[in-house]
Amino acid sequence: MWRFLVLRRSPQRVALVSLMLAVVLAGAVMLALTIPSARPALAARSGPAAAAPPELAVPGVNEAQLSLTKSVSDEPLLGGGIGFNLTVKNTASTGDPLEDDKAYNVSITDTLPAGVTFSSATPPPSLVIVNPDGTTTLVWNNLTDLEQQESTSVSIQATIKPTVTTATALVNSGTTSANQAPDNSQAYITATNTITAYPQAIDIEKRINQSTGVGQATGASG
């Protein structure tokens, strides 16, 4: 039990009382800090560890590949018409379901020779550009997307100009491109091909006629 002295009020005595109270309070705080807590520490929980979340399968690198094949669809004749066929194929064949091997936004650019005049195409091109050198550039933008082993084709019809001779080389060149992402954010892949045709003066067709017995004996045609 603490006993306090009743002192007459004076600055010196007030200071002395304040100092004594401060010492008492400091001692009480130190005593409280040194007494160990009676509250037992919580034991660590035992049991199996939480399972880690499953890893997500990350698709691999796009391995789309393009090929471009060309052919002459009509036998070119002087003063007549000529046709070109173009086929684009995604030749990728990884067989991995995690691989995104689709060719996105397939486009085609084809240049007709100066010796022909563009007539039509299926499907119709996005752009038709007549160049100063007499050639014609046809463009198909974002024609389609191609999965593995899928293909798409374009057919072109043109008219041979009167200035063309049998010695004129009708050179048709084409390029196809596609992106490895639907938003065109990845690398582009391309393929090119060129075909050359020479017009003929006349259309020669071979036909075999079955000869008769009389024809074989006399040499007359059947």
Image (cartoon, rainbow, N blue to C red):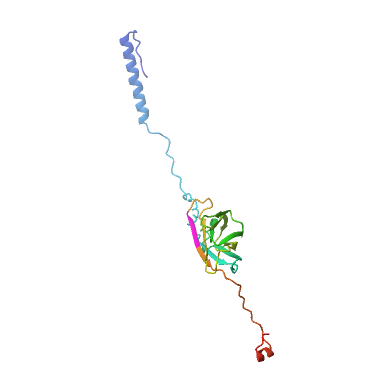
Name which quarter of the figure residue 116 lies in: bottom right
User: Is the stretch drawn in magenta largely helix, strand or loop?
Assistant: strand
Nearest the eye: 190 or 52: 190
At x 49% / y 59%, what residue is drawn?
A: 190
Residue 100: give x, y in percent of width and height: 52, 57
Locate the C terminus and report the quarter of the image it occupies.
bottom right
Numbered disc total: 0
- Magenta part of the protein: which range? 187-192
At x 66% / y 91%, what residue is drawn?
A: 218
Q: In this view, does 32 lie to the left or right of 108?
A: left
Q: Can residue 21 be seen in this view?
A: yes
Residue 220: give x, y in percent of width and height: 67, 87
At x 67% / y 88%, what residue is drawn?
A: 215
Residue 161: give x, y in percent of width and height: 58, 62
Nearest the eye: 43 or 97: 97
* 3 lies above or below 219: above
* 37 lies above or below 181: above
Q: Is residue 109 visible?
A: no
Residue 60 highlighted magenta (yes or no): no
Q: Which residue lies furthest to the front in this view?
A: 163
Name which quarter of the figure residue 21 lies in: top left
Q: Residue furthest bottom?
A: 217
Residue 190 highlighted magenta (yes or no): yes
Nearest the eye: 130 or 182: 130
* 103 lies above or below 46: below
At x 50% / y 61%, what residue is drawn?
A: 191
Locate the N terminus and report the quarter of the image it occupies.
top left
Residue 129: give x, y in percent of width and height: 55, 54
